[in-house]
Image (cartoon, helix red, strand yellow):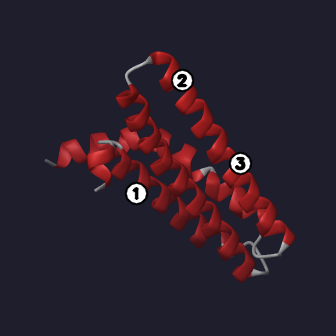
Amino acid sequence: MLKRLNKALPGLVLGIIIYGLLLQFTGMWLVEDRLRYTTGLWIGIGCALFMAIHMAVTIEDAVSLGTEDGAKRKTIAASMFRYTVVLIILIVITYFNLGMMLPAFFGVLGLKFSAYVQPLFERMGKKRR
């Protein structure tokens, strides 16, 4: 299903999850409150997954609009929506003490990590074939 949206999306999602697992296993040894660390991290990873899928849907919708001006407005509005949702989630995490803010932020950065590492995964996948 993800591949129908965008060819690169499955690799991006896989990279985000691998990044989350790496942070989970390394960070568990560095913090005292492991439960709040874990919840914060995986809420952040969930935000990164939401952002990746929402970006793919937005790009598909913007391309199908046909006009450059409409596509530009669509992508700007969608970007503002994504950042607002992530900001609200981070504020809720902090306010209700649902998890640690820093691991949640690092979880959101999983999208960046995955975007940088995704071409490497792609090359490794082509070599195996």
Q: Are marks 2 and 3 in contact (CB under 8 Å)?
A: no
Q: What residue would you read off at disc 2? A: 72
Residue 94 tag number: none
Q: Residues within 10 Å of mark 2 (few under 14, many from 20)?
A: some
Residue toward you, 71 or 12: 71
Residue 84 tag number: 3
Residue 14 tag number: 1
Residue 28: x and y in percent read 66, 75
Q: Secondary structure at mark 3?
A: helix
Task: Report the side of 19 relative to 1 (left or right).
Answer: right
Type of amino acid under label 1? Leu
The Cα–Cα distance between marks 2 and 3, rounded to whole angstroms, is 18 Å
Q: Residue furthest top?
A: 68
Q: Secondary structure at mark 1?
A: helix
Type of amino acid under label 2? Lys
Type of amino acid under label 3? Thr
Residue toward you, 85 or 44: 85
Residue shown at the point (42%, 42%) measured from the top left = 56
Position of 18 relative to 112 (above/below): below
Residue 10: x and y in percent read 34, 52
Residue 74: x and y in percent read 53, 32
- Say whether disc 3 or disc 1 marks the residue closer to the N-terminus: 1
